[in-house]
């Protein structure tokens, strides 16, 4: 019996060693490059595990200009977006959201087709995000010659991120925004933009975060040459766990959908025009 048992044990151990070596040789994706699929006004390259439902609350208060009268905008008018996103396949997520201002329904998709790996065989994570917004106001708001297509707006963004250390992750991106119908005395139809976001972990669950979006003049209409394209700047703090993330920040734009941030935000670039906001995400696995 012992003569049969010893070779069997040796075979099991040998297989275990080979399996462990193969596992060690696999270059897995980096752990937790971001705390959430959202970072203030931008999408990150992070997509949760398949069959994960993500519930999102985005909330922006009024501007700081009234000071103590409305508690620096907190008791002024607010803009809110509620959204649900579902990961249908590995690194593929689809979603639906509704924004209070303009009653805009949006349908979105995100695909992270490259993931940064721990051994650096893939140095970057790269994703594409896109959405289609459908305005929900009365049809008179969309011009005299109303068509359903007048309600549509679109946004597409290519992002690349890198986790440089256990505490620092940066992401850069480029985007294209479009509105099918617009008031040409105030806005353009199209806009190209550049984006930069970052996360700096200061505790196990806490991070300092920032957001920078710069609209460009590449597709600006000639009659808007005097319009200054202000950057959307925001600085905040994030608390993230396995299933939750809470971000609180001070930022320039009161818009929530990215195409609205890039084209429809035209107020003066002054500190009094900044506003407080927060983002809450909750993950549920199925």
Image (tube, grey):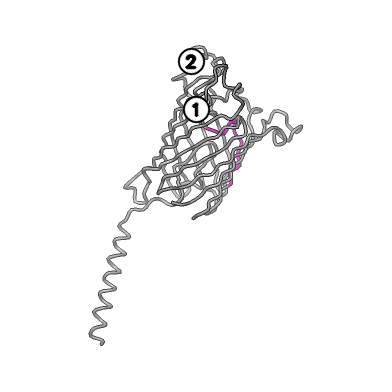
Is 238 within the magenta? no
Residue at 41% x, 48% y is: 89
Give the residue number, with chain letter if any, for mark 1.
Answer: 214
Q: Does 50 sit above or below residue 101?
A: below
Q: Does 195 sit above or below residue 5?
A: above
Residue at 56% x, 49% y is: 282
State which region is magenta: 246-257
Q: 95 or 142: which is nearer to us?
A: 142
Residue 185 locus on image (x, y percent): 56, 14
Give the residue number, with chain letter if any, for mark 2.
Answer: 221
Element type at marker 1?
strand
How far separated are the C-alphas under marks 2 and 1?
Answer: 17 Å
Q: Quadrant of residue 269?
A: top right
Residue at 34% x, 51% y is: 119
Residue at 62% x, 37% y is: 80
Q: Is residue 154 left or right of residue 122?
A: right
Other residues around mark 1 within 10 Å, as few (<14) / some (14–19) / many (≥20) = some
Element type at marker 2?
loop
């Amino acid at each position: 019996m012992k003569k049969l048992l010893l070779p069997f044990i040796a075979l099991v151990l040998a297989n275990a060693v080979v399996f462990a070596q193969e596992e060690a040789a696999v270059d897995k994706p980096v752990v937790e490059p971001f705390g959430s699929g959202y970072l203030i006004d931008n999408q990150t390259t992070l997509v949760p595990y398949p069959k994960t439902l993500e519930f999102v609350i985005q909330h922006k208060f009024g501007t700081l200009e009234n000071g103590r009268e409305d508690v620096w905008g907190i008791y002024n008018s607010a803009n809110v977006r509620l959204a649900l996103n579902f990961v249908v396949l590995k690194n593929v997520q689809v979603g639906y959201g509704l924004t209070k201002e303009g009653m805009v329904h949006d349908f979105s998709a995100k695909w992270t087709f490259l993931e940064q790996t721990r051994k650096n065989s893939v140095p970057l994570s790269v994703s594409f995000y896109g959405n289609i917004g459908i305005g929900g106001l009365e049809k008179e708001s969309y011009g005299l010659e109303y068509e359903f297509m007048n309600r549509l707006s679109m946004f597409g963004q290519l992002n690349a991120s890198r986790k440089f250390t256990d505490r620092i992750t940066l992401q850069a991106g480029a985007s294209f925004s479009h509105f099918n119908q617009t008031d040409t005395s105030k806005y353009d139809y199209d806009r190209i933009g550049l984006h930069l976001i970052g996360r700096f972990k200061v505790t196990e669950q806490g991070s300092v975060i920032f957001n920078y979006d710069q609209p460009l003049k590449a597709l600006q209409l000639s009659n808007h040459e005097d319009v200054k394209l202000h950057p959307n700047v925001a600085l905040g703090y994030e608390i993230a766990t396995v299933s939750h993330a809470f971000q609180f920040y001070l930022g320039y734009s009161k818009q929530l959908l990215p195409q609205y941030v890039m084209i429809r935000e035209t107020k003066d670039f002054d500190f009094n025009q900044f506003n407080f906001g927060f983002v809450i995400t909750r993950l549920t696995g199925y």
